Image (spheres, grey):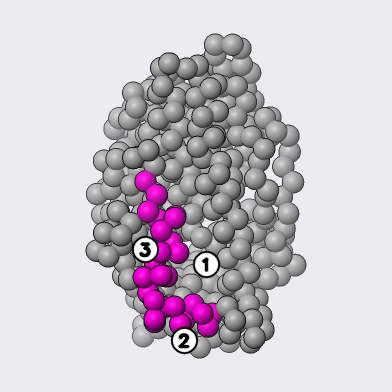
């Protein structure tokens, strides 16, 4: 089957590799003229790593990643621990794969190199998919450079501002959550005695929270800080920010957090407004299907947005490999398998926004007190709360 893919990000590249794994021909169209040092850190949880293990890429990813010792939560101002979930070998045994942190640029580079090694001519840069047309037995796309290309199916992996989704369902109506996010990457050696623990740590506080973890084998520290504010509503996530403004949002917090912001270079500090979107009524239109953020954009409070795209990619590639049914029915089967899980993860991410931002002392006691107690008296119960996400293995279905 000839598969056309709109978007050369994590979802699109993984979809291409999965389709190649199942024996299909792929062509990827990415609007950027080059794929370079984009974004900051990203977490690759065990449910996503199982797909990369099936593709033979887990070692390549692990060599460029950082393996945290635990997942933990702390109070933002005092640094007091709430709970800790040890990882390493325990996570591998419980969830079937490691939990890793990686720079987005390294992540995309691993995927891009794997695609070049397998299908050297399949990636086309500087070519955005602007529209599609379909007949009974094929689909064709119009590109920003004027070309038209035909194939058997189209995968719209072109992100939250997806042109494929807009044609399929019309313009979306995102709702501003009242939250904006800061992100920064800082050299670990610049932090001295205020380096964070080698964990994936969520720091919780009044109307704000942040997350810290290491990248590039421990050379860099990644920071994401989310603040409840109404004065910034630009959704683009690479908008430069001012270090003094970010510091002001967290100036009363633990020295680990303030040290990161004091050492954040202006060119490495960005901000974006967080918008929420309701689950879509459908992800498919005949021979066209949506994947990843184009289908189910998520708030970043479970670190599962890219992981869901990775899961999508495997399931879609497997479903279109059923030679006994036409492509539109295979894409409909992909939606049937994926939509309930992705909708559940979307809802859980949305719920975490409230959990992380308890404003009152009473709210903090009622929310974080039971977490603290469970972490000490029943740590296995804390782990079990994450099993439905991390233990999932779409390659075994």
Stretch of the chain drawn in magenta: 368-393
Q: Is mark 3 on a helix, strand or loop?
A: strand
Q: Give whichever of discs 3 and 2 has the lower sequence position.
A: 2
Q: Position of residue 340 (x, y in %)?
A: 55, 44
Q: Which of 187 and 327 is in front in this view?
A: 327
What whole-number distance in Å separates the C-alpha atoms at marks 3 and 2? 24 Å
Do tag 3 and tag 2 residues touch (Cβ < 8 Å)?
A: no
Q: What element carries label 1?
A: strand
Res. 384 mark? none
- Residue that numbered label 1 is attached to: 224
Res. 80 mark? 2
- Residue that numbered label 3 is attached to: 215
Q: Which of 185 and 68 is in front in this view?
A: 68
The residue shown at (35%, 43%) is 51
Q: Give whichever of discs 3 and 1 has the lower sequence position.
A: 3
Q: Answer above or below: position of 207 versus 80.
A: above
Residue 7 in view: no
Q: In this view, does 18 lie to the left or right of 162?
A: left
State the quadrant of the N terminus.
top left
The overriding secondary structure of the stretch rendered in magenta is helix
The residue shown at (58%, 85%) is 365
Near mark 3 (Cα within 10 A), the count class, few <14, some 14-19 or many ≥20, is: many
What whole-number distance in Å separates the C-alpha atoms at marks 3 and 1? 13 Å
Q: What element carries label 2?
A: loop
What whole-number distance in Å separates the C-alpha atoms at marks 2 and 1? 19 Å
Q: In this view, does 330 lie to the left or right of 129?
A: left
Q: In this view, does 316 lie to the left or right of 357?
A: left
Asked which quadrant contains residue 94, the reply is bottom left
Residue 354 in view: yes
Q: Position of residue 192 (x, y in %)?
A: 36, 82
């Amino acid at each position: 089957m000839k598969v056309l893919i709109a978007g050369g990000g994590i979802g699109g590249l993984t979809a291409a590799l999965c389709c190649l794994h199942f024996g299909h021909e792929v062509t990827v169209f990415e609007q950027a003229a080059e794929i370079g040092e984009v974004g900051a850190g990203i977490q690759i949880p065990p449910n996503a790593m199982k797909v990369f293990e099936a593709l033979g890429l887990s070692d390549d990813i692990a060599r460029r990643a950082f393996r945290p010792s635990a997942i933990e939560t702390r109070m933002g101002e005092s640094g007091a621990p709430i709970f800790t979930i040890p990882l390493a070998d325990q996570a591998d045994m419980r969830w079937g794969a490691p939990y890793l942190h990686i720079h987005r640029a390294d992540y995309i580079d691993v995927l891009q190199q794997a695609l070049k090694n397998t299908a050297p001519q399949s990636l086309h840069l500087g070519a955005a998919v602007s529209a599609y047309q379909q007949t009974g037995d094929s689909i064709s796309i119009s590109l920003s450079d004027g070309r038209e290309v035909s194939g058997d199916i189209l995968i719209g992996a072109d992100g939250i501002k997806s042109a494929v989704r807009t044609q399929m369902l019309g313009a979306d109506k995102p709702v501003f959550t009242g939250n904006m996010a800061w992100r920064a990457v800082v050299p670990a050696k610049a932090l001295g005695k205020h380096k964070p623990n080698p964990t994936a740590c969520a720091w919780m506080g009044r109307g704000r929270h942040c997350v810290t973890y290491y990248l590039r084998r421990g050379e860099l520290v990644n920071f994401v800080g989310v603040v409840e504010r109404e004065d910034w509503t630009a959704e683009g996530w690479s908008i430069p920010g001012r270090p003094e403004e970010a510091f002001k949002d967290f100036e009363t917090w633990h020295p680990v957090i303030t040290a990161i912001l004091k050492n954040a270079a202006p060119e490495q500090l960005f901000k974006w407004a967080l918008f929420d979107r309701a689950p879509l009524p459908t992800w498919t239109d005949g021979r066209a299907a949506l994947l990843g953020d184009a289908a189910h954009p998520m708030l970043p409070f479970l670190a599962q947005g890219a992981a869901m795209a990775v899961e999508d990619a495997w399931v879609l590639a497997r479903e279109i490999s059923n030679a006994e049914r036409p492509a539109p029915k295979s894409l409909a089967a992909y939606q049937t398998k994926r939509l309930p899980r992705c909708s559940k993860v979307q809802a859980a991410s949305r719920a975490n926004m409230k959990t992380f931002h308890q404003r009152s002392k009473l709210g903090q006691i009622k929310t974080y007190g039971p977490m603290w107690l469970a972490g000490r008296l029943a740590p296995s119960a804390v782990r079990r709360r994450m099993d439905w996400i991390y233990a999932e293995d779409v390659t075994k279905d």
